[in-house]
Amino acid sequence: MLLFQLPEDMLYLILSYLDRTSLCRLSQVCKKFYHFTNRDTVWRRIASECINTGMTRQGTDMYPQIPLKERVKVSQNWSRGHCRREIMLKWKTNLLPWMQLDGDVLYLSQAADIGAYHLQAGGGRLQHKPLALHSGHREDVCRFVLTDTHLISAGGDGKIIVHHRRSAFCMEYSGHNQEVNCVDSRGGVIVSGSRDRTARVWALSSSRLGECLHTIPTLDRVWSVAISPSQSSFVTGTACCDNFSPLRIWDIERCQLVSCLGTQFRRGAGVLDIVFENPFQLLTCGYDTYIRYWDLRVSSRKCVMEWEEPHDSALYCIQSDENHMIASGSSYYGVVRLWDKRQTYCLQTFHLPSATSSPVYCLRFNTSHLYAALATALYALDFKGPAPRGRR
């Protein structure tokens, strides 16, 4: 065939302009075409247009160990809502769990402890006995965050505890006089927010470990914080109980107010979760039932896009694939929704059954599974395998 007489890079370029169906048919022609059409180079353009393939808007591949062709196939299940639902863990007492996902290890807070659970091959099941247990708080863990070397937790006892992930070392940070609702860490710095109406910046470097670098009066309870990937600023989300913007950007070195996001938040529209996609774009959600997408290069006064929760429920948590997809967790009936930023309406809705009308307190996902933590159970939605007949 004439195609095989072309230089290899030219052949890959031509194949990269074919659609998914054409590539799949072409792969069945002969072994040589099968070889060429399985290369990631051919699927990169298609993957960047699909939801949750691990390709970011900047073109970074977050899961290079998984073939792009396989991820594009699984992406169709996310778009269509085809998945298996499984309960991975259950507990008897109502809790406010939080999660982080790091490769094949899922970190889950239950009351005052944080367990590290190994996800078995395929990601749909976990070993019920944790690999490690991080403790130290006298009240429930509110939030926690992972860095390459540390697990940093914020608790209802007003403490922040820094655990080393590969040793038994841990250190307690004291400074807040009420519960610490949120915490984030990047570049050797920790930022925490508390019910005591302050945000604090702490050192994580070994030479200044435990030192509070700055205390910022926020004049309102802080529900969420997020440090920009540029590490030059951070955002606080407050309860919006007074006449202050609930979203404010602060310079991380001088801790001075840089700007406020939005001008028309109603009273009580507290911000419960903030997710940076890159240094200029971030997502927020909270009690006013909206997901908002902000682009700091365009405007700080108005978001560039917004999506309303169809049942007028508060949104407790969000996560982004850093490209087209957003997942959100609602405050009632265990509702998880998937959104495509290119559309104005919800893409898919999943109802996770619970003994009580539980919020989705936290959710995390990779390219094949979504994990959702409710008051009494941890659920997994498996998009890799076919959905059981009659269930979606």
Image (cartoon, helix red, strand yellow):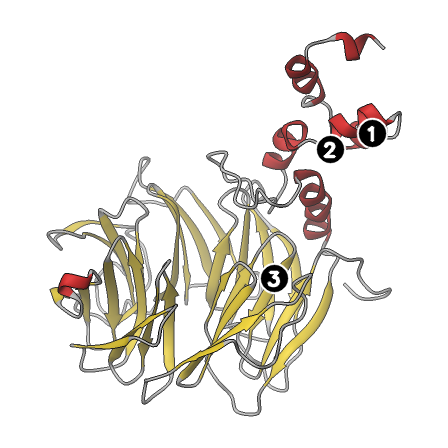
> Counting other residues with Cα less than 10 Å from the Cα at mark 1, is it few (<14), some (14-19), or many (20 or more)?
some
Residue corresponding to mark 1: 27
Q: Nearer the viewer, mark 2 or mark 3?
A: 2
Q: Is residue 69 left or right of residue 197?
A: right
* Above or below, comparing residue 288 to residue 90 in the picture: above
Task: Tell which of 273 and 382 is nearer to you.
Answer: 382
What count of labels does the image hold? 3
**Inter-mark Cα distance, 3 to 1:** 30 Å
Task: Tell which of 8 and 18 is nearer to you.
Answer: 8
**Inter-mark Cα distance, 2 to 3:** 26 Å
Amino acid found under the numbered disc labelled 3: Leu
Q: Quadrant of residue 385?
A: bottom right
Residue corresponding to mark 3: 370
Task: Tell which of 309 and 37 is nearer to you.
Answer: 37
Mark 2 element type: loop
Residue corresponding to mark 2: 38
In the image, what residue occupies the spot 63% across and 40% down?
Answer: 50
Q: Nearer the viewer, mark 3 or mark 1?
A: 1
* Above or below, comparing residue 189 to residue 197 in the picture: above
Cβ atoms under marks 2 and 3 closer than 8 Å? no
> In x, y percent, where is residue 51?
61, 44
If you read the primary sequence from the N terminus, does the residue marked by circle 2 or circle 1 appear first? 1
> In x, y percent, where is residue 144?
37, 70
Amino acid found under the numbered disc labelled 2: Asn
Mark 1 element type: loop
Q: In which quadrant of the rendered image does the C terminus lie?
A: bottom right
In the image, what residue occupies the spot 25% across and 80% down?
Answer: 159
> In x, y percent, where is residue 341?
54, 44
Cβ atoms under marks 2 and 1 closer than 8 Å? yes
